[in-house]
Structures are given as C-alpha cells and as structure tokens.
Image (cartoon, rainbow, N blue to C red):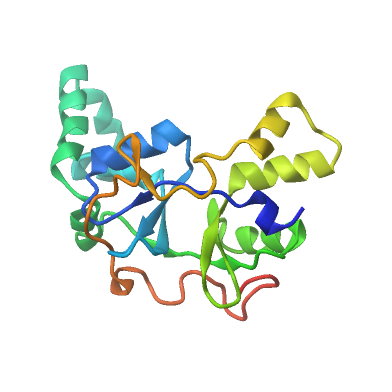
C-alpha cells in the first residue's frame, strides 16, 4: 500500500485551543498525538498526547513523583479542571509543551518508506504532501501498523475496519468541538517549532 491509500484527516488544534479541549480531542479520536496548525489551518507541528499529562502535574510532583500520593481525589480533579483556563499557546510559551516539526512523505511513497520516516523520530503522525507542497492529509501510526499487519497476513475484522474507516470523513475540513469546520481562530507560528527537529541529520529515505 502507498501513502495516498492510507492518508486521512485528523483534528487540527491551535494556540487558542485550551489544554482541556486538546485532551478531549485526543480522547474522542483515540489519537497518540495532535496536529497543530497555524492561523490558516496549515499543519506545521505535532504534539505528543502524553505531554498533556505533565501539564496537569504541579511542579513539586514532577520533581518528586511520590508526592502524588498526598493529593486526594478532589484536589486531583481540581488540578485537571485547570486545563480549562490555559491554552496550548500559553503552555508552549512557558516551555511546558514542546512541539516537533512534522516530517513529510509523498502520496506515492511505500509502506517501507513511510515506516522509515516514522521510525526516524518515533513519530505517531506524519504529513502527506504533493511535490508542490499541497497538503493531502496525515498518516497515523495505528493505520500504518494496520497496513503492515494486513501485508503480513494478520488481517482481521478490526484491522480491515481501521484501514477502511477514516478518523474523519475524507475531504472534510478540520474537526473541532464536535462540528466539522468549527475550528477556533489563531494558530502557531513557525517560530514555535524547533528548527530541524523534524528530520535527523542527513535525512531519511522517503522524507521530503
């Protein structure tokens, strides 16, 4: 299978997205990472979903994880609720979240080329673009592994379902808050993403 057969649309978040909204998006779509877009909805970075967990934790718990046992259930829920009051942009500026530049593959790239790029930086999501730079969609780790499992003869109902069913209907705009196209204003600038963080030195086969 090639990239164009596996690509799909995923929710795009922005600087104005709150931490709680980002957590909801990861949960609703069972994503391992979030695609971050600029003001024009152009995907420019990926944010590992696991980073949102650290945002909930007070600094003293990050310094000494054993102190988490001293926080009762009510206080823990209160800490989670604070995600409603902070945006991804604020967390990025405070260096509590770190974005990674998205690597890119071409629509005609093979499973081996896709796997090489994903493995190079342990990326859960990579972008598919035409040679002229036109954005086509993304490849998620779960769908790529479903294709690999199928090619290895380990096809099942759930594997077929993952290959046949997109996270968002193909061709629809970015999804946010339950309605397609209901995307909050504001974006991330290229300066928020570390230069050169998307590809290892020397590049990798299949990366463009």
Q: Residue 18, position in %: x, y?
A: 22, 45
Classify residue 131 by image quadrant: bottom right
The residue depicted at 52 percent of the width and 41 percent of the height is 169
Q: Nearer the viewer, residue 161 or 52?
A: 161
Q: 117 above or below 152?
A: below
The answer to whether residue 117 is left or right of residue 92 is right
Quadrant placement of the C terminus: bottom right
Residue reaching furthest to the front:
171
Q: Nearer the viewer, residue 53 or 161?
A: 161
Q: Nearer the viewer, residue 86 or 111?
A: 111
Q: 161 above or below 72?
A: below
Residue reaching furthest to the bottom:
202
Q: How many marks?
A: 0
The residue depicted at 64 percent of the width and 35 percent of the height is 162
The residue depicted at 35 percent of the width and 69 percent of the height is 193
Residue reaching furthest to the right:
153
The answer to whether residue 200 is left or right of residue 31 is right
The answer to whether residue 100 is left or right of residue 76 is right
Q: Residue 114, position in %: x, y?
A: 68, 60
Q: Nearer the viewer, residue 143 or 40?
A: 40
Q: Residue 141, position in %: x, y?
A: 60, 47
Classify residue 182 by image quadrant: top left
Classify residue 118 by image quadrant: bottom right
Q: Residue 130, position in %: x, y?
A: 59, 70
The residue depicted at 30 percent of the width and 69 percent of the height is 192
């Amino acid at each position: 299978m090639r990239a164009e057969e596996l690509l799909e649309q995923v929710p795009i978040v922005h600087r104005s997205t709150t931490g709680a909204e980002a957590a909801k998006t990861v949960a609703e779509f069972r994503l391992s990472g979030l695609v971050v877009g600029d003001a024009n909805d152009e995907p420019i970075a990926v944010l590992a979903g696991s980073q949102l967990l650290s945002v909930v934790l007070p600094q003293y718990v990050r310094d000494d994880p054993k102190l988490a046992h001293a926080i009762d259930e009510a206080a823990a829920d209160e800490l989670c609720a604070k995600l409603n009051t902070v945006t991804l942009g604020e967390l990025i500026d405070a260096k509590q979240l770190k974005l990674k530049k998205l690597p890119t593959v071409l629509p005609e790239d093979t499973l081996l080329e896709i796997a090489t790029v994903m493995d190079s930086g342990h990326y859960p999501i990579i972008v598919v673009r035409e040679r002229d730079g036109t954005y086509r969609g993304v490849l998620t780790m779960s769908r790529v592994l479903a294709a690999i499992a199928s090619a290895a003869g380990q096809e099942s109902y759930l594997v077929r379902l993952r290959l046949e069913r997109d996270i968002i209907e193909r061709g629809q705009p970015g999804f946010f808050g339950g309605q397609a196209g209901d995307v909050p204003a504001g974006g991330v600038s290229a300066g928020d993403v570390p230069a050169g963080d998307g590809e290892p030195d020397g590049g990798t086969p299949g990366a463009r």
